[in-house]
Image (spheres, rainbow, N blue to C red):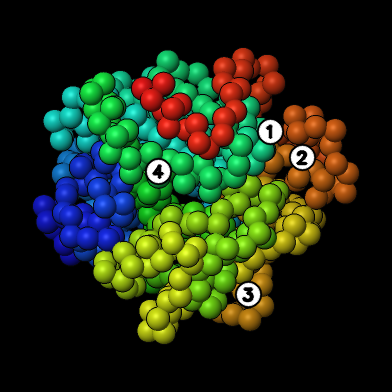
Amino acid sequence: MIGRSQMKYTSTRSEQSVWSAQAIKQGLAPDGGLFMPAVIPTLTEEMLQAYRSLSYPALAAKIMGLYLSDYTEAELLADTTQAYGAERFPDGAAPVVRLDEGLHVMELWHGPTAAFKDMALQIMPRLFVRALGKTGETRTALILVATSGDTGKAALEGYADVGQVKIQVFYPSEGVSTVQKLQMMTQGGRNVSVQGIRGNFDDAQSGVKHIFSSEQVARTLSERGTFLSSANSINWGRLVPQVVYYVHGYCQMVNQGAIHLGEPIDVCVPTGNFGNIFAAYLAKEMGLPIHRLICASNANHVLTEFLERGVYDRNRPFYHTMSPSMDILVSSNVERLLYLLCGQQATAALMTELASRGGYRLGSADFARLRESFVGYYADEAQTAACIKDTFQTHGYLCDTHTAVALHAAEEHRKVNKGFQTLVVSTASPYKFAADVYASLTGTKPRDELAALAMLQDATACPPPLPLQCLDKRTVRFDGVIDPSQMTGAVLDFA
């Protein structure tokens, strides 16, 4: 196993080596690449046996400690204990629920914003603030976030009123649910800013990447004692906590008697930006017994085509769906997968091709390696709605729209690939998307999304989580909407 003192990070596009604290502070490598560990740590069966009895905070400290060599074990345990304690996760972090003999759901949405992003964004601000100290940074960090819905609120909640940090979130004004929008627009904190943009998530993400790559913006901010960083999954400090819950989910399945230690499972993940499923791939590469990674997409199924044909092509229609957090055509974390499959030089070339032509094709050898671990499925709107209804009627289990996409993909995969237990990742409370969930169950569209919260509870007898109650009573602080071309000015004004 790689010793903690040896772990450093390099860009996916060139040889630029830094320690983990520097990687977390910067977010994005100077060449535009993403930071990756120089070596993937090893996870043995003996380690898994020991991990089975650990609490979630203790497990998180152990797993992240394999990657974050310049953080002490005491620091990590102190931070994970605060991040994943009962105050923030009163129902426990990442419980595993059995639906049938071969199908299990890991619920990642029991945190303060009712979405899976809490699993990373409750710990990331603590890692980030420590990184500032470890690197001797005295400037104020301005965290820029492009969000398709859930990341924005989770990041705002995690960084609100954190010292030496400001956070600014951009979201597509017509591309998130009313609940998601209200969660962001009513955010408290003296150091936060929220802006809607006219466009989709890819427009927001492209705008943020443009700001990060601007030397003029960097100089202007530095003159004001400020520098940029990110809370999106391009930041390693956001991604590494996600590895933890796959190890946890596997251990829980062993503890519940669903599998024996060492038995492989399939893992199904609804994903748009590819960070969540890439964390599962890292766990597999470490040695977690995962047979196949099932990538679940909605009507914007650019990832399905990539995994089935080895062709990534963003030149296609963009659809607004009932699973908006997956309405993405440029999945940033695919770059990390390419780095592991193809190496730095080829990754840099493919990213240049994506920027110039909007797509690329993998070579046959790289595509064969991709297919060893991944398979892709997608669900259209009718299939998503049907899955919500069928799952509730068959199992008495209420799921959100994104989880329904994953459950549909898992069932499609199980039709032709039997013999493995399947763990489906549930990424949000059904009440985050109450109107679409209610309409899927009843065939009746609610009069508005806020009314749907009460209507869904009446129809199912399942209460909404506390973070989503009384949203309409909270004061709106941020209701501005701008064009993508105005994002740079908004950043400079806020800084």
Alpha-carbon distance for marks 2 and 3?
29 Å
Q: Earlier in the sequence, mark 2 or mark 4?
A: 4
As drawn, the label of residue 414 is 3
Above or below, 179 against 48 in this view is above
Left or right, residue 81 beside residue 134: right
Crowd class of label 1 (few under 14; some 14 to 19; many from 20; radius 10 Å): many
- Quarter of image, res 77: top left
Residue at the (32%, 33%) spot, across then down? 217
Above or below, 138 against 266 in this view is above
CB-based contact (under 8 Å), mark 2 and mark 3: no
Location of mark 1 (residue): 178
Q: Earlier in the sequence, mark 3 or mark 1?
A: 1
Residue at the (44%, 62%) spot, across then down? 356
Mark 2 lies on a secondary structure that is: helix
| Front of the two marks 2 and 4 | 4
Alpha-carbon distance for marks 3 and 1?
34 Å
Mark 1 lies on a secondary structure that is: helix
| Front of the two marks 2 and 3 | 2
Q: Identify which amino acid the numbered label 2 is placed on.
A: Ala
